[in-house]
Amino acid sequence: MKKINIAIDGTSSTGKSTLAKQIANKLNYIYIDSGAMYRCVTLFAIQNNWLNGSHFDKESLIESLPDIHLKFALNKEKNDQTIFLNGIAVEDEIRSMEVSNAVSRVAAVPEIRRAMVRLQHEFGKDKGVVMDGRDIGTVVFPNAELKLFLTCSPEVRAQRRYEEMQQKGISASFEQVLSNIKSRDHLDSSRADSPLIKASDALEINTENRSVNELLDHVLKLIAKKS
């Protein structure tokens, strides 16, 4: 079976990452969480005091992009793939509410998007990659053999994210999470550079009433047809 590239787009907390990880594990593909890449850049900006509340020093962050080194690798302690920022595993740090509330502003900067897209192109050039995000099927992998666009209501997505954060010990109320999701939806879909839109040849899947296993089985059949 030949390897293909799989693009999974959709709003936050629709199950993109969970599905992408399962596909990668099942087919021995490389999983790339594009959203985590932008979260790492956001965390880097916060750590350097370039992003704090309404203050955002875009110029300093753009100038420092060559100093940001991202790598996806297996975290042996958790037996899971995680992202490393300049050699340090930051999977939990990038899921904080502080990063969540700021990441859409960082992702809207054209220079940052171009830098991340160049890196994503490198990840996918040898095929066998499943990547999720907001513009994978439209910008990053417009020629991906399989494109999926996941949807789900804001309330269900907020509940999923809230429970995930509770399990990780990240402090936030359900109302804060819901507000953050609605705000990110608006910013992601209305930004001028690479907005969140469904690719014309993407298959739309509503994940609201599907179990994780049902969704995976359905998508694996789609992949088999493409492969």
Image (cartoon, grey):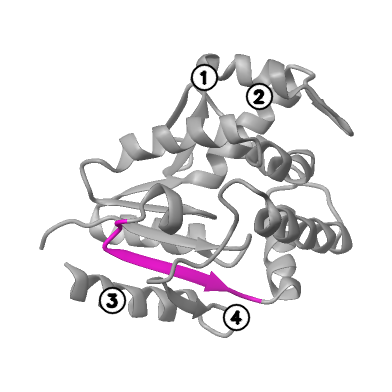
Residue 74 can be seen, yes or no: no
Q: Quadrant of the N terminus?
A: bottom left
Q: Residues within 10 Å of mark 1 (few under 14, many from 20)?
A: some
Residue 148 figure quarter: bottom left
The residue that mark 2 highlights is 44
At label 2, which amino acid type do we have?
Phe
Where does the magenta region start and end? 143-152
Residue furthest bottom in the image: 209
Q: Secondary structure at mark 1?
A: loop
Per the picture, the main secondary structure of the magenta-coloured stretch is strand
Mark nearer the N terminus (1 vs 4): 1
At label 4, which amino acid type do we have?
Glu
Residue 31 horizontal/vertical position (percent):
37, 48
Residue 53 versus residue 68 in the image, above or below? below
Q: CA distance from mark 4 to mark 2?
A: 33 Å
Q: Secondary structure at mark 2?
A: helix
Residue 42 can be seen, yes or no: yes
The residue that mark 1 highlights is 86
Residue 21 figure quarter: bottom left
The residue that mark 4 highlights is 208
